[in-house]
Amino acid sequence: MIDILQFEFMRNALYAAILVSIACGIVGTFIVIKRIVFISGGITHAAFGGIGLGYLLGVNPVLTAIPFSLLAACAVGMLRTHTKISEDSAIGMLWAVGMALGILFIGLTPGYVPDLFSYLFGSILTVPLSDIVIMIVLDAIIVVIVFVFYKEFHALAFDEEFSLVVGVPTQTLYVLLLCLVALSVIILIRVVGIILVLALLTIPAVTARQVTMRLSRMIVCSTGFAVVSAVVGLWLSYILNLPSGATIVLVLSAAFLGSVCIRRLRTAAVRPHERR
């Protein structure tokens, strides 16, 4: 593993893998507990509109995807309470509109779009230093916001109705949480692409849930699983010449299956002692 770090693109890929894992571990935990995986998918695909706009304007697509994702997150949060449209219908519309705008903007872009597939399917080996800087800034924002509002997010995740009764601004916090999801999506897009973003946001958190139900420990375990799986997947993809994003997701899936098997074996081992 150390030998391949002599290449700059591999060092950038390793940095990106670690930064992505931080976002996945923190935000993914709330996504799983709050059961808003489908909402995350809607925000993810809405971000494609921002990517297309970036190509049309000739700027870094990641920068234009940020406001697109944040607007989508706020739209979902506002439609949830201020209209009679069901949440899944609103997500479906945003999903379709975001993808349609992205296709439209790319169609209007003169010339050939060379690296579009890297945003659809991911390409961690081509992540430039400028994107890593953006990832660092977005990670820092996520960490600070969750640290400051940890108690409120904890209450929102486990009992939203009680939080509202005791005076917690649940609607504002919900929109803020969706904005964190949007920022996480931006971090993930260049690594695993739009197609596999949901896997990286959910699998580490679901795996951590096999180990503990305490929120703080879930976040730590989820981040740890994501870091290890991302590094191992990156190394395997380099050694075996496989697509990096897909390999990372498969390693995460293997870790989840392993955690399920270990939990069942432990449960089976404890039951005979309880009978005694």
Image: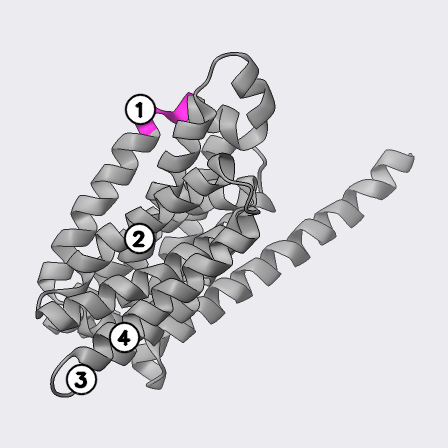
Of labels 1 and 3, earlier in sequence is 3
Q: CA distance from mark 3 to mark 4?
A: 16 Å
What colour-coding does the image apply? one colour
**Amino acid type, residue under disc 3 in the picture:** Pro
Viewed as shown, does residue 236 lie left or right of 104? right
Q: Which residues are magenta?
A: 147-151
**Amino acid type, residue under disc 4 in the picture:** Leu
Query: Disc 2 marks which residue?
Result: 69
Q: CA distance from mark 1 to mark 3?
A: 41 Å
Q: Tell me if mark 2 has few (under 14), some (14-19) or many (20+) residues whose alpha carbon lies within 10 angstroms of its own.
A: many
Residue 104: mark in rendering: 4
Q: Is residue 183 visible?
A: no
Q: Secondary structure at mark 1?
A: helix
Name the residue at 46% across, 31% down.
216
Extreme residue toward the right, this view: 276
Query: Disc 1 marks which residue?
Result: 148
Viewed as shown, does residue 55 lie left or right of 74? left
Quadrant of the rendered image containing residue 34: top right
Q: Secondary structure at mark 4?
A: helix
Circles 3 and 4: CB atoms closer than 8 Å: no
Query: Disc 3 marks which residue?
Result: 114
Q: On the rendered image, what quadrant is the C terminus found in?
A: top right
User: Is 237 rendered above or below residue 98?
Assistant: below
- Please state which of the two labelled residues, at mark 4 or mark 1, is closer to the viewer: 4
**Amino acid type, residue under disc 1 in the picture:** Val
Circles 1 and 3: CB atoms closer than 8 Å: no
Of labels 3 and 4, earlier in sequence is 4
Name the residue at 83% across, 42% down.
271
Of labels 2 and 4, earlier in sequence is 2
Viewed as shown, does residue 117 lie left or right of 62? right
